[in-house]
Amino acid sequence: MDAKVTVKGYAKINLGLDVIGKLDNGYHLLRSVMQQIDLYDTVELSHLPERMENKDTYHALTEEALTDNGLQIVLTSDSDAVPLDQSNLAYKAAKLLMEHDSIREGVHIHIIKKIPVAAGLAGGSTDAAAVLMGMNELFGLGHSKDELQELGVKLGADVPFCIMGGSALAEGIGEKLTPIEKMPEMYIVIVKPSIGVSTKYVYENLRLEQVIHPDTEQILAAMQRKDLEEMTELLGNVLESVTIEKYPLIRELKDAMLETGAVGSLMSGSGPTVFGVFDTMENAVEAEKRMRQKYPQVFIQAAGIIR
């Protein structure tokens, strides 16, 4: 077993997000074109007994280690925005795997946060995915990616994709993943305004009979042909119908992104993050500079995609 494992948890955007139905248990059925981008949290995992020797350090970072049914998990982070309690998906991921594999040894999870929280970028989900992958290596569990994805869907719809990585069509409640092999060359600028969006509110107020559904098959076909112009013309997210109505700033940010030279712009997930698609990194970096001048208090980042 390794003494310490470090895993990058990459952010994701939705190049297309359609909701096609709802199950009796409340889960929504999705068809989503998901893409990882080169913006990531760093998740460090280590065995707790060795790390607990310096207990004063732990007390300085957080309260007592979290315990649940005899399990011991320490969560720390460099960011005040990260909850260090049982509500954190990283904690839930550790608990899930410890119970599944009967792991009795404690674990320390340290999250170096770069992805904005509550942004529609799967920041919590990717940290959970990183914990599952990292603990699998740390404790020598030998699970395949498919097995980890089956566990991950119990934590959230985005977790299986965050384990798989790259580009994929996600269906069902997020557990059915089909890799996307071909992609046009593209670069992304994300803008996360300082507003909070409740995913629960967005889905509760979504009216499927009133929205324009994105043509997912045509998006995939354009990607297959590596036709960036056609792909960006087809970008669509049904959740915008709720979020933009409540937060008009999101539409303003989409328009501003297009004004800076983006070939397409869309809200990611349930928001509030908006991203622009650019044909070169030079154009993306220039757009990032211009957007920073216009919105100096807003998180803005240019990034490539992860293939």
Image (cartoon, grey):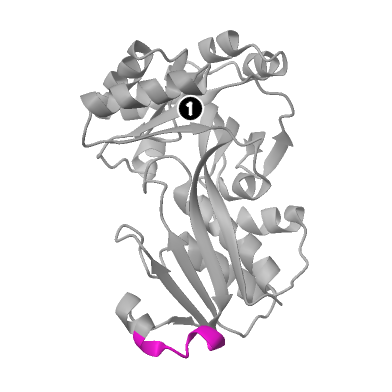
Residue depicted at x 67% and y 20%: 220
Q: Is residue 108 left or right of residue 197?
A: right
Classify mark 1: helix, strand or loop.
strand
Q: In which quarter of the image is residue 55?
A: bottom left
Q: Is residue 60 left or right of residue 101?
A: left
Q: Quarter holding the C terminus?
A: top right
Is residue 53 in the magenta section? yes
Residue nearest the observer in this picture, 218 or 223: 223
- x and y, in percent, of residue 66 in the image: 43, 79
Mark 1 highlights which residue? 188
Identify whether 278 is placed above or below 179: above
Left/right placement of residue 54 relative to residue 228 reads: left
Residue 91 horizontal side relative to residue 181, left or right:
left
Q: Where is residue 42 in the image (x, y as percent from the top left)?
A: 50, 57
Q: Position of residue 283 (x, y in %)?
A: 44, 18
Residue 59 to residue 140: above or below: below
The amino acid at mark 1 is Ile
Q: For residue 228: magenta?
A: no
Residue 91 percent coordinates (x, y):
49, 68
State the residue at coordinates (53%, 16%). Answer: 279
For mark 1, does the 10 Å Cα neighbourhood hold few (<14), some (14 to 19), or many (20 or more) residues? many
Seen from the viewer's position, the closer of residues 238 and 104 is 104
Please name the residue shown 45% across and 77% down the image. 74
Establish if 122 lies above or below 20: below
Rendered residue at 54%/58% (across/down) = 128
Residue 6: in sight, yes or no?
yes
Residue range of the region highlighted in magenta in the rendering: 49-56
Q: Does the rendering let one see residue 69?
A: no
Q: Is the magenta stretch mostly helix, strand or loop?
A: helix
